[in-house]
Image: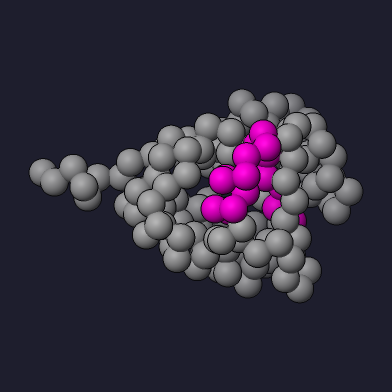
Amino acid sequence: MNDLLEPHGSFNLSVSNNILIARLSDSWNKECAEDFSINFKIKASPLLGKPWGHLVFLDNWNLGVPEMLPIITELVTWCIENGLEKSAQVYNDSMIKKYTIDQMVVKQKGGFERRIFAEPDKAITWLSQYGFIVDENICPQDAV
């Protein structure tokens, strides 16, 4: 079997009320990005038809290959077209990570807005101001 075709990188996805929570880890190849896109759309399906939010933990994500950029860009477009309004990205300050993410994810478009937070609590508070609420019984960092 050709190792180059195996997904490299990992992710976990869960839904809490009207928020899709994601935790991305490791360095991604194109195949991992494709798996993420497919699984993200499946996990988001119960949220479609009404506004929803996204909480993503990126501290353990070590970027990826350039071939993943168009896959994630397409996913972002799909999300916005399907009701995603707010995306809270949680990671410690990293210029390289910020630059890479900025290449894939718009900061604002129509009713969509993306913000970066160093602390999960601040991200959760920001999302809640727009009606996107994480279940009180869930610790978001542990939910995924």
Q: Tell me residue 46's x, y (percent).
A: 60, 56
Seen at 65% across and 64% down, the residue is: 106
Q: Which of the 4 quarters of the picture holds residue 113? A: bottom right
The C terminus is located in which quarter? top right
Q: Check residue 100 for magenta coloring.
A: yes
Q: Tell me residue 70's x, y (percent).
A: 45, 65
Q: How many marks?
A: 0
Q: Tell me residue 6's x, y (percent).
A: 24, 45
Seen at 78% across and 69% down, the residue is: 111
The residue segment tinted magenta is 86-101
Q: Is residue 104 visible?
A: yes
Depicted 21 relative to depicted 52: above or below: above
Residue 10 placement, left or right of 17: left
Q: Is residue 19 visible?
A: no
Residue 17 placement, left or right of 26: right
Seen at 53% across and 32% down, the residue is: 60
Q: Nearer the viewer, residue 48 or 108?
A: 108
Q: Tell me residue 135's x, y (percent).
A: 75, 35
Kindly give the residue lying farthest to the front in the view shown.
95
Seen at 70% across and 27% down, the residue is: 139
Depicted 74 relative to depicted 97: above or below: below
Kindly give the residue lying farthest to the left in the view shown.
1
Q: Which of the 4 quarters of the picture holds residue 93? A: top right
Residue 93 placement, left or right of 38: right
Q: Check residue 68 for magenta coloring.
A: no
